[in-house]
Image: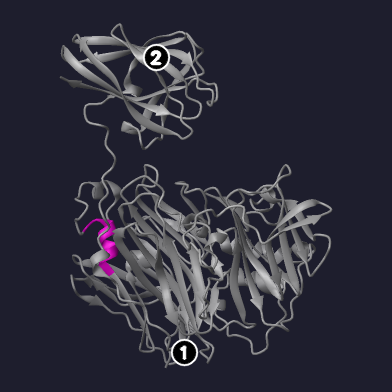
Amino acid sequence: MKIVCLSLIALTSACAIAQEVSVKSLLPQMTDLSFLTHRPNPAFKMAQYSSYDRRSDPGPNSDPFANGDAGNFIRVENTPNGKEYVMADLKGPGTVVRLWSANPSGTIRFYFDGESEPRIKAKMSDFLTGKITPLIEPFGYTASSGANVYFPFPYAKSLKITADAANGGTPTSLYYHVGYRTYATGTKVKTFVWEDFSINKATIANVADRLTHPSDDASLKTIGYGSIKSGARLTVALKQSISSAVRTLQVKIPVLGADDAKKLAWEDPRQPHNVLRNLILHVSFDAEDCIDAPLGDFFGAAPGINPYENLPMTVTADGTLTCRFVMPFENLGPEIPVTVNAAVKPFPWGPNTYHFHAQWLGEHARTRPFRDMTFLDVKGEGYFVGSNLHVASPVPEWWGEGDEKARVDGESFPSTFGTGSEDYYGYAWGSTELFTRPYHAQTRVDGPGSMGHTSLNRWQIFDPISYTSSIKFTLEMWHWADVVATFVHTAYWYAEPGGTPPSAVDKQLLLPPKIEPMKPVEGAIEGENLEIASKTGGKTEIQGGFWKCSGGKQLWWMDAHPGEKLVLKIPVADAGTYEVVGNFCQAGDYGIHKMMINGRAVDPIDFYSPNLDWNKHVLGTFTLPKGTVMLEVECVGHNPAADPRQMFGLDYLLLTKK
């Protein structure tokens, strides 16, 4: 009797004889998750070309954490089109399945099977952002500043992909990924032709519909229901007389709404983020441990309930978690009612069938020194099919410069080497914008900046990393700040029975850390709250979104001319002698200004800086009356190195009584 791996869509057995690889044969794999339950036929190796920093290459001076990940190419070729920069040089037979860029520009060209003229030539920004039919959403799109294309481009012999600069020169700033499968020599592959778009029009439309409207099996029914007391288990067993597979798993956990949760302490076990962490999901199939992860993390919802829907997972605001599986639960919190629904169907188990696995790992530690965090390190045979990541960062600085690295079957150097954590998850520039797409999502970003809790996932369904003896998948811990932060992650993989089991959950990491929001400087007189007494030129506004500012905002005066003045009313609570300190913006277009407080002049200050920042300046010691005094700001000019906009930005004033 077999109780077999998770499979989300229709289940089919692998064919004994591999069919010809073509756009037609590959398109259904974009939504058919049963494809992942068997050894691939034909077999392939998944790898990635990217613009990673070549200083990470092996050698005596190798720096595995080098971060210059843009504008690095295989080589430069002189062509009738001018200089072309080779992004990927693939030897077939194979298939490109994913392309990504943070900043597509110029022209992208595809040269198939040694052609001298490109079969695909397009404006890269159009090609990668869903502006060329049929590579429109959900095949091509922008997700939180990241440009993505998921579509099969098969080639029988070879494929070369090149880029050039938008206006000549060198595309030195281009970030890119090219994900591809390589098949064994002799595999029959039908090379992509432009007509494949029209020939497969109906299939493309069907795949698009299934990517954007994932559906659960109609036979979904309740198989387990009960309340789990602290430390107890709710076990649901599937005992089928024939080999079977769970096609859909749905778990319902009643959770508090946001308003009620706010009334509770962060550590309260009734908080949704604690409920979903304290329910531990254990799954075994055929007497093998296969899954060990907190319930919320397994469904990609951590921390708490962060609703989203993509192809393999769905989380709704009412606490309904959908994957497609049956599992026992161990509870570490209060008594929790649980409903388990599943769809179970007969399944043709065979010698090439894989079990589904997941494990939860992480660390709460300093971000220095830089290091590789292990998501998965297993032996056996199977596929790596994705991960989710929950980061809890105590500061707004960007935490995700780290590159993903996949070493397959004992590779000494990764065949997949990325360009940044957000790039791996399919977005770019550390964007805080939430998004949901069929294969990836960013479901939570607290802010300001990258501070607080962030939740991400990526499912490698069309680009699974196959392995025949071992795989090690890591992501660099590369945070701009030297702080103590929490990185916890769930890795998902399919594996032949007898492979490495999942690691046990580290219960010391279950409680998500409480991260206090940034508070205004105590006693500060905020620039954005000051009344303007008069202004003789330029424009003023309140500018927000700056985590380095007290209160996140500043008073902004721009485009003033020399001699023009801005006069502000400063409240003074009590008469006395005060040291006055101001926190001011400094940047490349800020000017030189002199100030006067209550009629007494302050030496001019040059607020130019090549980098945007806020700095404190002691303006002096002043005897001030109770009530209102005037701060007069006069534009003097600008530093020769500055853009001549003569800007002025006041975050706050601090009056310290002497």
Task: Give the x, y percent position of residue 203.
Answer: 69, 67
List the single residue furthest toward the front.
60
Residue ID for mark 2: 594
Residue ID for mark 1: 243
Q: Nearer the viewer, residue 540 or 87?
A: 87
Location of the N terminus (image quadrant) = bottom left
Q: Quadrant of residue 462?
A: bottom right
Task: Decide if residue 650 is in sight here.
Answer: yes
User: The magenta stretch spans which residues?
Assistant: 270-279
Up the image or down, 381 lies above or below 310; here it is below
Q: Quadrant of residue 89?
A: bottom right
Q: Amino acid at mark 1?
A: Ser
What residue sits 43% from the left and 69% below the top?
Answer: 323
Task: Give the x, y percent position of residue 275.
Answer: 26, 62
Location of the C terminus (image quadrant) = top left
Up the image or down, 530 lies above or below 335; here it is above
Task: Give the x, y percent position of residue 400.
Answer: 43, 54
Q: Quadrant of residue 499?
A: bottom left
Left or right: 602 as drawn, with respect to 401? left
